[in-house]
Image: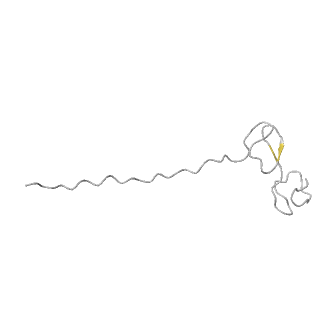
Amino acid sequence: MICSSCQANNPDQAKFCMQCGAAQASTCPPCSTELPPEARFCFGCGHQIGEASTPPAVASTPVAPPEPEPITESV
């Protein structure tokens, strides 16, 4: 497999170039379509490639209870 970044020759099973470290093409697990390294979904079957990108969880900020109203005595 020829690296698209530096044209170095790499073994077919290479995930990264041995010369420059660039990501090499991957294969879709369900349908075996060869995909470019930047693919997030397979263009052959639509399978999601790699980890799902989920938005970061938003931490809830605790809210303090309201201040009690001062007690006033009327005489």
Give the farthest residue toward the left.
75
- Identify the residue at the far front of this view: 74
Q: In this rendering, is residue 50 above or below 6?
A: above
Observer-nearest residue: 70 or 60?
Answer: 70
In the foreground, 7 or 73: 73
**Residue at image point 18% right, 55% down:** 71
Q: What is the residue that sits farthest to the bottom in this orientation?
A: 19
In the rendered image, residue 9, in percent from the top left (x then y), is placed at 92, 58
Q: Is residue 64 left or right of residue 47?
A: left
Residue 41 rendering spot, x and y as whole percentages = 75, 43
- Picture mark count: 0
Quadrant, the C terminus: bottom left
Residue 43, image quadrant: top right
71 in relation to 29, above or below:
below
Task: Specify how the rendered protein is coloured.
Answer: secondary structure
Residue at x 75%, y 38% (from the top left corner): 46
Q: Is residue 75 left or right of residue 70?
A: left
Q: Identify the residue at horizontal 86%, vertical 51% (top origin).
A: 13
Q: Provide residue 3's location: percent of width, then percent of height.
A: 88, 56
Q: Is residue 69 left or right of residue 26?
A: left
Q: Is residue 28 above or below residue 1?
A: above
